[in-house]
Amino acid sequence: MAAIEAEKLNFTYPDADRAALSDATFSIPSGGFYLLMGPSGSGKSTLLRLLQGEIAPHGALSGQLHCDSPAGFVFQNPQDSLVTDSVQRELAFSPEHAGLDGAAVARRVGECAAFFHLEPLMERTTASLSGGEQQLLSLAAAMTGSPRVLLLDEPCAALDPAAEEKFLQVLLRLNRELGVTVLMSPHTPGAALAQADGVLLLRAGRCTCYDDPHAFARALRQSGDPMLQALPVGAILFDEVPLTVREAQPLAAHLRCKPAPAPQPAGKPVLTLKEICFAYEKKSADVLFRLSLTLTAGKCYGIVGANGSGKSTMLKLIAGVMYPTTGSVTVNGEIAPLIELGAGFDLDLTARENVFLNGAVLGHDRAYMQEHFQNIIDFAELWDFVDVPVKNYSSGMIARLGFSIATEVRADILACDEILSVGDFMFQQKCHQRMEQMLSGGTTLLFVSHDINQVKQLCKRAIWIDHGHLRGDGPAEEVCNAYVEAMQRGE
């Protein structure tokens, strides 16, 4: 029996030039674990919101759509779903509003706290939790309503690898032990692909359903689809499309590593942090402690570390959004910050209007932004949605617009926080190409990422922040490997 089903489903946003979903037909069986994949702007977020119902977007809808009720929803950003200020109240919110009595609410909260191992956090405020803890709480809160279906929109995009693995294991327990039907849109397929029962692929609002992940991977490989590059490396290298290390090991015996590149000479300092400390409140512990760094022009730096380690805080200090408690930040040149997804956007305005709004914030007049407008929208691939309010955009579309604006103005330093972990693989490759062009032109690139392979690919140097301290600063390969080994040891 199908838990989720659509037949000739069509949906168009008001004022949009094309449909977000076109004749979508598919069926997901009850108790299935399916991934929802496709390029940014293909309709993934739209479909998930339509399935949930209560957060369905406005627009013209036709065709048939069914989703077993109730359906829980987990957003990419836990701040979009957390509604109270404490862990205990958050877990109690849904059953209380469902009309359960006090004893039933307490029982439901206790069951969820035990299942998700949240007992140590029950007396904490939601604001004091790390990103991984907040996302786990969002998932637990969604489950207090005892949903039969769980819908997730890129829930792991901002999680470090250890937190992402923990989150996936909890999802698998919900599916395998409780029989909850799961449909998740992942930012990258990763380990989830090998665990899934199937894949729903969306392209320009049209869908293809694969009931076997290996069949999905083979189809991408046979067609030469660029999305293949987002799959586990074994599926890229071998015709057998292995999706796990265990499957790939027998096929990889003949592969050899490339020699390490020769070290590059140091360049002109463009950014200096000197003994910076920072605390969000006067009596609270330092988030960053005596951090010192010197970055040189024309190089790409990756910042790695667990959720809550201080990476985003450091980037905000560099961008001038906040100021250190002690120490100094010296920036030689103009900086374009992409600190938070959608920061600086008015969600009620269209992409066209937000281009000029952001231009004003970055110090450019309307004539300058008009001159660059076509390049911005071309690169972001948003002409079909240029006059649609940004609140109707997926996270990937917002990332595309923000990245396109920030890179078109050609600042001396580009500072990004997890922007490159959002959206589809093809656009990420476009971003990589533009970043390489900017590097050749002398721009310094600095970005936070939980994607270790991405850091190794793009960066000569990596910076590892651990509980507010600088734990590693050196060649990207060495620092990233040390960071991964520390996580595996549970440090």
Image (cartoon, rainbow, N blue to C red):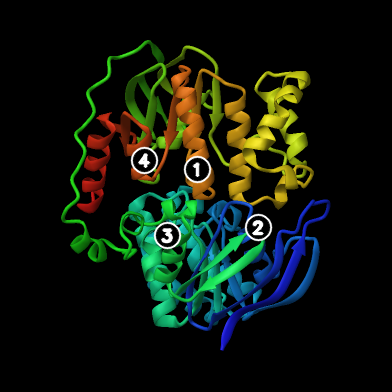
Q: Which mark is residue 204?
A: 2
Q: Pointers 1 and 2 in contact (CB under 8 A)?
A: no
Lower sequence index among marks 1 and 3 = 3
Q: CA distance from mark 4 to mark 2?
A: 38 Å
Determine which residue is flagged by label 3: 221
- What's the residue at 57%, 78% (across, down)? 102
Task: Tell me the SS state at disc 4.
Answer: loop
1 or 4: mark nearer the eye: 1
Q: Pointers 3 and 4 in contact (CB under 8 A)?
A: no
x and y, in percent, of residue 36 in the image: 54, 65
- Characterize the local packing of mark 3: few (<14), some (14-19) or many (20 or more) Cα atoms within 10 angstroms: many
Q: CA distance from mark 1 to mark 2?
A: 18 Å
- Characterize the local packing of mark 2: few (<14), some (14-19) or many (20 or more) Cα atoms within 10 angstroms: some
- Characterize the local packing of mark 4: few (<14), some (14-19) or many (20 or more) Cα atoms within 10 angstroms: many
Determine which residue is flagged by label 4: 309
Q: Pointers 4 and 2 in contact (CB under 8 A)?
A: no
Q: CA distance from mark 3 to mark 4?
A: 38 Å
Q: Amino acid at mark 4?
A: Ser
Lower sequence index among marks 3 and 4 = 3
Task: Tell me the SS state at disc 2.
Answer: loop
Q: Which mark is residue 458?
A: none
1 or 3: mark nearer the eye: 3
3 or 4: mark nearer the eye: 3
Q: Amino acid at mark 3?
A: Arg
Q: Is residue 56 left or right of residue 209?
A: right
x and y, in percent, of residue 395 in the image: 60, 49
Q: Is residue 454 above or below residue 194?
A: above
Task: Tell me the SS state at disc 1.
Answer: helix
4 or 2: mark nearer the eye: 2
Q: Is residue 435 above or below residue 106?
A: above
